[in-house]
Amino acid sequence: MNLLLAEVAQATQRLADAGVPSPRNDAEELAAFVHGVKRGELHTVKDVDFDARYWEVTARREAREPLQHITGRAYFRYLELQVGPGVFVPRPETESVVGWAIDAVRAMDVVEPLIVDLCTGSGAIALALAQEVPRSRVHAVELSEDALRWTRKNVEGSRVDLRQGDALTSFTDLDGQVDLVISNPPYIPLTEWEYVQPEARDYDPELALFSGEDGLDLIRGIERTAHRLLRPGGVVVIEHADTQGGQVPWIFTEERGWADAADHPDLNNRPRFATARKAMP
């Protein structure tokens, strides 16, 4: 074992003791970041090339600063995104939400599907859809100027139409035309603040986390926005907390013009996102 791998083992233990959820992964990611190699190449770093900055970044992660803020990058499906203070860091569980949406769009008999991503944050969802559904027309909106500094970097050179504005009032020019509306909105109840992981509570913007006493305020608003935007037969996909399973589909009722409202599990078989289809007239 070379010096770096020995240090990674020590860093893994320190991160585990600090309560970091994925200590080995993060210790290796930090080592790769500091030494300019891939995780699978850590064994190739010579002992004389060990960089003591590794212990500086390990201490930051030990204090629960997000890994992605330290490295400045986040991975999402096939994307590498730039992230940092002011923007919500995309999570792995959202990848299954996007996977469902991609399958749904591909199943539509539409040559150039029109897609809207509400509360886009880093742009992860919009960019993944643009990349994996090549003929799609993808539009995204974000309210926060702090987040948009990162979003603009990520969407530069892509086909994504990025706008600044309120998710509930944007895209009036697309009313009744959209095939898919997708969103990972804020959905944490204000009463749950103290139980949120420090990486999110202390570093992600509050605007991207909390939404009223039960966490569903913005989702209720998005229900109306999605109904306005979608064509008849169009689909909405919206992420929610696993503790909200069963609650969100009831927002998308037949009385409000929806059909086939349902919840779907994530990779850990926990309810993670709801879908509904705009009813035909």
Image: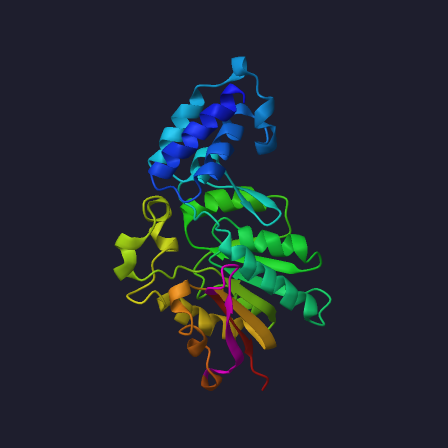
The structure residue drawn at horizontal position 61% and vertical position 71%, both measured from the top left corner, is 177
Q: Name the quadrant of the N terminus.
A: top right
Q: Is residue 228 above or below residue 24?
A: below
Look at the image and say whether residue 137 sits in the magenta stretch. no
Q: Is residue 46 above or below residue 40?
A: above
The structure residue drawn at horizontal position 47% and vertical position 37%, both measured from the top left corner, is 24
Q: Name the quadrant of the C terminus.
A: bottom right
Is 219 or 189 nearer to us in this picture? 189
Q: Is residue 18 left or right of residue 266?
A: left
Using the rendered view, name the quadrant where residue 136 is placed: bottom right
Is 20 or 135 nearer to us in this picture? 20
First to last magenta residue range:
256-271
Q: Give the image's coloring scheme.
A: rainbow
> Is residue 135 among what the camera can see?
yes
Q: Is residue 71 above or below residue 106?
A: above
Residue 254, how many percent across, how many down? 48, 85
The structure residue drawn at horizontal position 44% and vertical position 19%, both measured from the top left corner, is 52
